[in-house]
Image (cartoon, grey):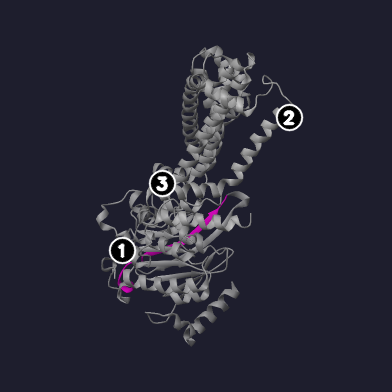
């Protein structure tokens, strides 16, 4: 399935390549003077090439801000962020990453397939041949036959699938996801979690995934980046020692429960 | 009532199905179905309209109201028939002025709104002026324009345009700003230019707002043209209204008013139809 997107995915990649995202002593402050607010302080972390890193933390700890900073949506106040060796701005203009928002953010006047095509219609980009086929992507996310539906006619889960297909159409090397399944019901969320893992393994894309669900963070992530608040900083960068491919059953294993319990305890300290 | 409502729903459902299915129905059957549907949906409106006309006729008859004061519906109908030629030759200039005013007034409003959204200084500079012009009563503005532009069509088009301009400007500014922050973030991640954001996001997002204003403009442009014709004109429905009033030709006056109303309703329907064709997505949040 989706042969063009498949890339050999081995742990070797992570060991020998430069990190996909490298963050050093990152400070982010909003406002100025007395009303200045420090969202993130001295954050340093490396996201390995082809890795799946989930970000967890109490609300207001700046995990979304960190993600938006990598996406060049929030300016850096101090330190450096390097995305595939470039500044976030260069990476954005070079289409190195794609962003999936909490809301699907589809344009309601465009059909499903036209929404997936949107990234190919705007911005400066190279020849179209290097991009994925929108119809094939819709097939991959399980929406074959709904190409000409309008977003209103889809369920919340289906809309988020379209958003993921739209993100993948430029074949990004990095996928930034900001609580993409946060607004969905649990059953839909579980299903999309499994499919996202399958997609990740098929495409070899690096994924940075913000969530506030501990089980979701553990189920998806090779690593969990735990942040704490006031000011936002790294609490722990934890490797999740669970084998891939993972199925939802893994959540009932003792190892899984141990990790979630550990994270829950950490979260209480934050 | 309770018996009719469910059958109406079923009939409407049938029509939807026949519209979507590929199997073609004979045109006659379609038409018949369409008319039946329309009747089923509109019977309260039709009944009320007939009721009003009957009431009007009976008040005139019972109280023996003289024709010059208020003509009966049948007399108006006769005036419509007898003066068809006069009404038609006066309808055309009014229609032309209203359409030209509609076009230029809305075009100016849309362009100005686009400018305002991209340049806050332009908005600060010209928005108060637009409000000031808006607050001058149109009836007071008409003589000024007639003095400047004379008795031709120009002042009529300007007044019809001015009357359309302000609601469209306000709605269009709001509509262009209605694109959600997330959509704008998405376009930024895609490194879209301001032009691309305008064409792909802001303008489509503004369509429901624009059409709300255009529906108002469709009726008010006719009003603007007629008001302008009152002030100084020898042609058009407005001039005919003045002439019929001064000559106590009440049936003709009423017939002219009917034509003017029909014109406004027609323009309104055309805009509503265009809206249905263009705004196909749900806009419940507006």
Marks 1 and 3 close (CB-CB < 8 Å): no
Q: Chain of mark 1?
A: A
**Mark 2 to mark 3: distance in Å?**
62 Å
User: Could one spot residue B167 in this view of the protein?
Assistant: yes
Image coords of residue A212 (percent x, y) = 53, 69
Marks 1 and 2 close (CB-CB < 8 Å): no
Q: Chain of mark 2?
A: B
What is the quadrant of residue B249 in the picture?
A: top right
Q: Please give the residue where the numbered disc 1 appears in the rendered image.
A: A136
Position above or below: B159 against A175: above
Image coords of residue A254 (percent x, y) = 49, 87
What is the quadrant of residue A91 in the picture?
A: bottom left
Image coords of residue B136 (percent x, y) = 63, 24
The residue stretch that appears in magenta: A14-31
Task: Please give the label number shown on residue B62.
Answer: 2
**Mark 1 to mark 2: distance in Å?**
76 Å
Residues A115 and A11: in front is A115
Q: Is residue A21 magenta?
A: yes
Are labels 1 and 2 assigned to the same chain? no
SS for dot 2: helix
**Mark 1 to mark 3: distance in Å?**
24 Å
Outermost residue toward the bottom in this view: A254
Q: Position of A233 compared to A5: left or right?
A: right
* Residue name at image x 50 percent, y 18 percent: B86
Marks 2 and 3 close (CB-CB < 8 Å): no
User: Could one spot residue B206 in this view of the protein?
Assistant: no
Are labels 2 and 3 assigned to the same chain? yes
Closer mark to the observer between disc 1 and disc 2: 2
Q: Position of A157 compared to A140: left or right?
A: right
């Amino acid at each position: 399935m989706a042969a063009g997107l498949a890339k050999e995915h081995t742990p070797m990649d992570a060991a020998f390549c430069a990190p996909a995202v490298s963050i050093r002593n990152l400070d982010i402050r909003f406002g100025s003077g007395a009303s200045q607010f420090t969202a993130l302080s001295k954050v340093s972390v490396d996201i390995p090439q082809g890795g799946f890193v989930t970000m967890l933390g109490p609300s207001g700890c700046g995990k979304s801000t960190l993600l938006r900073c990598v996406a060049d949506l929030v300016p850096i106040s101090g330190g450096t962020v390097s995305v595939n060796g470039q500044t976030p701005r260069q990476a954005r203009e070079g289409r190195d990453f794609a962003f999936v928002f909490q809301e699907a953010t589809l344009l309601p006047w465009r059909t499903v397939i036209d929404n997936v095509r949107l990234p190919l219609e705007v911005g400066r980009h190279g020849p179209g041949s290097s991009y994925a086929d929108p119809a094939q992507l819709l097939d991959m996310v399980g929406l074959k036959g709904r190409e000409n539906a309008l977003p209103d006619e889809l369920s919340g889960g289906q809309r988020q699938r379209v958003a993921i297909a739209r993100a993948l159409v430029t074949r990004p090397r990095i996928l930034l996801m900001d609580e993409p399944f946060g607004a969905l019901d649990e059953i839909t969320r579980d299903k999309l979690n499994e499919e996202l893992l399958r997609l990740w393994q098929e495409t070899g894309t690096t994924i940075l995934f913000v969530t506030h669900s501990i089980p979701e963070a553990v189920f998806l992530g090779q690593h969990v980046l735990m942040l704490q608040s006031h000011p936002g900083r790294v609490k722990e960068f934890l490797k999740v020692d669970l084998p891939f491919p993972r199925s939802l059953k893994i959540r009932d294993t003792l190892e899984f429960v141990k990790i979630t319990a550990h994270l829950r305890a950490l979260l209480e300290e934050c | 009532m309770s018996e009719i409502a469910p059958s109406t729903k079923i009939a409407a459902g049938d029509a939807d199905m026949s519209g979507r299915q590929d199997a073609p129905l004979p045109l006659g059957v379609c038409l018949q179905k369409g008319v039946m549907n329309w009747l089923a949906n509109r019977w309260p409106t039709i009944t009320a309209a007939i009721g009003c006309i009957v009431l009007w006729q009976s008040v005139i008859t019972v109280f023996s109201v003289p024709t010059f004061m208020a003509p009966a519906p049948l007399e108006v109908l006769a005036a419509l028939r007898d003066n068809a030629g006069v009404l038609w030759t006066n309808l055309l200039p009014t229609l032309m002025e209203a359409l030209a005013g509609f076009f230029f007034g809305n075009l100016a409003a849309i362009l100005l709104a686009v400018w305002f959204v991209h340049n806050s200084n332009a908005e600060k500079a010209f928005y108060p002026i637009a409000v000031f012009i808006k607050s001058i009563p149109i009836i007071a503005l008409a003589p000024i324009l007639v003095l400047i532009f004379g008795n031709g069509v120009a002042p009529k088009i300007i007044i019809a345009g001015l009357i359309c301009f302000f609601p469209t400007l306000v709605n269009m500014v709001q509509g262009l700003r209605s694109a959600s922050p997330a959509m704008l973030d998405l376009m930024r991640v895609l490194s879209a230019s301001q032009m691309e954001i305008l064409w792909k996001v802001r303008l489509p997002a503004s369509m429901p707002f624009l059409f709300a204003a255009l529906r108002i403009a469709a009726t008010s442009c006719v009003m603007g043209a007629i008001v302008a014709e009152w002030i100084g004109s020898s042609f058009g429905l407005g001039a005919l209204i003045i002439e019929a009033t001064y000559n106590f030709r009440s049936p003709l006056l009423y017939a002219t008013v009917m034509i003017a109303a029909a014109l406004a309703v027609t323009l309104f329907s055309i805009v509503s139809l265009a809206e249905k064709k263009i705004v196909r997505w749900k806009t419940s949040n507006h």
